[in-house]
Image (cartoon, helix red, strand yellow):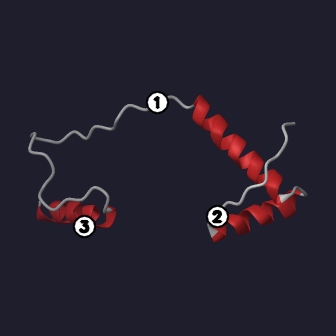
Amino acid sequence: MLPCMRTTIRLDEQLLIEAKKQAAETGRTLTQVIHDALREAFARRRTSKPRAPVRFSTVGGQGLQPGVDLDDTAALLDLMERHDDAR
């Protein structure tokens, strides 16, 4: 194993709580849990294939209706339900 370096990192409080809990449940140190998590994340990134950009198709070629925000699912569902009710 390579020599370890001491460093300071800032973690989200909930991540730290979960990491400490996993360390206690598995009998490992917090350092080992963080090492394993980083190794897994890096391995996943190396093996994942680049994804093609997502393209949204529209009906009639008119694009999105004014005011439609695809990031706001609640508003989008409201709009779709109003459209269905109008039929």
Query: Which quadrant: the C terminus?
Result: bottom left
Q: Amino acid at mark 1?
A: Pro
How dense is the environment of label 1, judged by Cα within 10 Å: few (below 14), some, or many (20 and up)? few
Which comes before the other along the chain, label 1 or label 2? 2
Pointer 1 and pointer 2: residues touching (CB < 8 Å)?
no
User: Along the polypeptide, which appears first: circle 2 or circle 3?
Assistant: 2
Q: Where is residue 47 shown, x and y percent of the image?
A: 60, 29
**Looking at the image, which residue is at 13% across and 55% down?**
65
Say left or right for 64 vs 10: left
Crowding near the residue tagged with mark 2, few <14, some 14–19, many ≥20 C-alpha atoms within 10 Å: few
As drawn, the label of residue 50 is 1
Residue pictured at 9% horizontal, 40% vertical: 60
Q: Give above or below for 61 relative to 28.
A: above
Q: Amino acid at mark 2?
A: Arg
**For the residues carrying marks 1 and 2, which lies nearer the camera in this image?**
2
Please give left or right for residue 71 compared with residue 46 in the image: left
Q: From the image, tell me which residue sits under label 2.
A: 10
* Picture quarter with the N terminus: top right
Q: Position of residue 81 (x, y in %)?
A: 23, 64
Labels 2, 3: front one = 2
Q: Secondary structure at mark 2?
A: loop
* Residue 27: mark: none
Q: Quadrant of residue 58?
A: top left
Residue 82 position by quadrant:
bottom left
The residue mark sitting in front, 3 or 1, is 1
Q: Tell me which amino acid carries mark 3.
A: Asp
Label annotation for residue 78:
3
Q: Nearer the viewer, residue 68 or 9?
A: 9
Q: CA distance from mark 3 to mark 1?
A: 34 Å
Q: How many marks?
A: 3
Q: Residue furthest front?
A: 6
